[in-house]
Structure formats: structure tokens, C-alpha cells
Amino acid sequence: GKKVGVLAVQGDVSEHVRAFVDALGGEGEVVEVRSAADLAGCDAFAIPGGESTTIARLIGENGLREAIRSFTGGIFATCAGMVIVAATINDTRFAPLGIVDITVERNAFGRQKDSFEADLEVLGLEDPFHAVFIRAPVAAAAGPGVEVLSRIPQGIVAVRQGKHMALSFHPELSGDLRLHRMFLAGL
Ligand code: GLN
């Protein structure tokens, strides 16, 4: 079975752990990651939603920045995680990791629509995915190696690049594990 690490420094960690435990269906294991040693041996790594400036700072303080950049498994980055793995962001307070070739705009939906839900058409899924957006980012642009899985008028909200996936929304909150399973199948 696969070993999935979940970055456990800030954000909705327990929901991600639960979703991957369920998606693995008794095979494999899920571990919380707070150090490079925790990440070693993982086949996949999830970066949860939360506050991207805080998560980026804690990645640095925990000596995880280079460990994540050189990680050879798949990365499942959601919401704040999508900001962190991007190539370029509209915020100068921290440098994104440059793992997924996307240009990301933080808090892309402004204050009135800070949070909303939408049924998305996602490439590779037969039926729409009910997505929960919470002060969500979008990708304004994606490089040639990036497959756009879903797009709404405001921008790109789901991508895949090799083994990695980055999502603007919170798939761990929908009770729908299809995107987790798509990710695990691509490892
Ligand atoms: N707005 C947050 C950020 O950019 C992300 C929100 C979330 O992860 N739900 O840090």
C-alpha cells in the first residue's frame, strides 16, 4: 500500500488525514508530516488548506522547504497548498515552492464571495464535483506541462502536472473521494 504524508503544521489537517484513510480503504497508511524525516518514505504528500503565509513560514522553520522541493512522490495541494506549490503568486511575503507550473492569485474571490460552493465539471470525472471554496485562490495561468482539470469564469481551479494535483477548493470537506482516488491512481 501507499504511504501518504499530510503536512501537519497548520490548517485542516485532520480532515485530510481522514479523507486519505478513507480513500486508501484499509490499504496503505497516512502519517502526519512535520519534518523532513517524516516525509522520507512517503509516496504522496498532501498540503492542506489554511493560511498560506503561515504554512509557508512553518515549512521554512521546520526545515521542510528543500525536502518538499526534492520530494519525488506526488503532491496533493489544496487551497493554501495550491498557493504554496505554485511557480508564481501575487504576494511578496513568501516565495512559493515552484513545483507546479501555475501562476496563482490568492483570495481571488474578494470579500463578498469569500466562501461559496459550486458543482464543477472536472476532466476525468463523469459527474460534477461539489466543491467548497473558502477564501480560495485560482490559477490565472498554467504552463504547457499542466493539464487543466477544471475552470470557472474566475480562473483555473483544478490542475494536474504529472503525479501532482493542485485544487483551489477543499475536496476533503465534500465527502466525495473521487479526486483523492484519481490522485492515488496516478502515483
Ligand atoms: N486564503 C488562504 C491563503 O491564501 C487560503 C484559504 C484556504 O486554504 N482555505 O492563505
Image: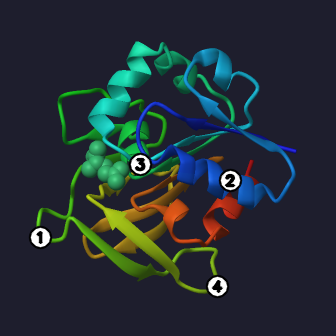
How much space separates mark 4 and mark 2, taking CA atoms?
21 Å
> In the rendered image of this protein, does residue 109 appear above or below residue 33?
below
Q: Quadrant of the N terminus?
A: top right
Mark 2: C-beta under 8 Å from nearest atom of ligand 1 = no
Q: Amino acid at mark 2?
A: Phe
For mark 4, what is the residue? Answer: 126
How much space separates mark 2 and mark 3, taking CA atoms?
15 Å
Residue 96 point in image, percent of width and height: 35, 32
Sequence-earlier tag: 3 or 4: 3
Label 2 sits on a secondary structure element that is helix
For mark 1, what is the residue? Answer: 112
Which residue is at a point 47% across and 45% down the rendered structure image?
Answer: 48
Going by the image, does 37 lie left or right of 156? Answer: right
Residue 10 point in image, percent of width and height: 41, 36
For mark 3, what is the residue? Answer: 49
Q: Is residue 2 visible?
A: yes
Which residue is at a point 59% across and 22% down the rendered structure image?
Answer: 70
